[in-house]
Amino acid sequence: MKTTTRANHQIKAPELRVIGPEGESLGVLSLAEALAKAAQYGSDLIEISPTATPPVAKIMDYGKFQYEANKKQKQAKSKSHSTEVKSIQIKIGTGEHDLTLKAKKTSEWLKEGHRIKIDLFLSGRSKYMEYNFLKGRLERILHLISEPYKIADPVKKGPKGLSMIIERDK
């Protein structure tokens, strides 16, 4: 979203509420008077709020204005955190040590705030084993996770096996 900020002679409003370089209000001035004041200060006239009645303009350096706008935008972008769904895959015969390592990684991801999809991969005949046994195999890893979590999506049977999604419990 790129918004163009009008400055100096790009401003079309006949009257402006002008703010001085120190933040003081200079009152409602005509466009010509406002441009003269800006020239007097050796700065630019920048339209801050074009939708106000009358529009608000500030006398300041245009480069400084752009720098501050970019800085605010970057700061807002850095504060937004996107969560993604990480995936862990286990099999029926996955050993305890491997499960411990996968649970440790899952705990790290939960701490970062990600959601984790845990898949119990079934191949061949194991697809037709008893559901409760398979569910128990999938839940073995849940007992090893050290971070507090909640089940976001319960155990579901899919074409490749069972899967569930967990997320950090606040």
Image (cartoon, rainbow, N blue to C red):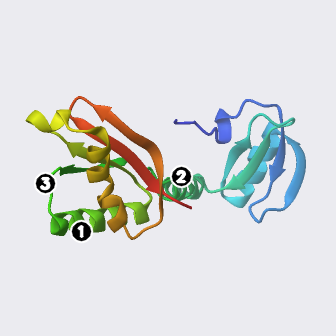
Residue at 43 percent of width and 42 percent of height: 154
Secondary structure under badge 2?
helix
Residue at 79 percent of width and 44 percent of height: 56
Type of the residue with mark 2: Gln
9 and 141: which is toward the camera: 141
Per the model, the C-alpha gap separating discs 3 and 1 is: 14 Å
Query: Which badge, 2 or 3, comes first in the chain's sequence?
Result: 2
Report which residue position mark 3 lands on: 93
Q: Which mark is residue 116?
A: none
Residue at 20 percent of width and 38 percent of height: 129
Estimate the x, y position of residue 90 in percent, counting from the top left. Answer: 20, 51
Residue at 42 percent of width and 51 percent of height: 166
Q: In the displayed structure, does residue 113 sit left or right of residue 99? A: right
Q: In the displayed structure, does residue 129 sit left or right of residue 74? A: left
Query: Which badge, 1 or 2, comes first in the chain's sequence?
Result: 2
Q: In the displayed structure, does residue 159 sit left or right of residue 147? A: left
Q: Which mark is residue 100?
A: 1
- In this view, 148 is above or below 29: below
Estimate the x, y position of residue 140 in percent, counting from the top left. Answer: 29, 59
Q: Nearer the viewer, mark 3 or mark 1?
A: 3
Type of the residue with mark 3: Gly
Q: Quadrant of residue 21?
A: bottom right
Estimate the x, y position of residue 114 in percent, counting from the top left. Answer: 41, 54
Query: Which badge, 3 or 1, comes first in the chain's sequence?
Result: 3
Q: Nearer the viewer, mark 2 or mark 3?
A: 3
Q: Nearer the viewer, mark 1 or mark 2?
A: 1
Report which residue position mark 2 lands on: 73
Type of the residue with mark 1: Thr
Per the model, the C-alpha gap separating discs 2 and 3 is: 50 Å
Q: Are marks 2 and 3 in contact (CB under 8 Å)?
A: no
Locate the C terminus by quadrant. bottom right
Residue at the far right in the pictured view: 27
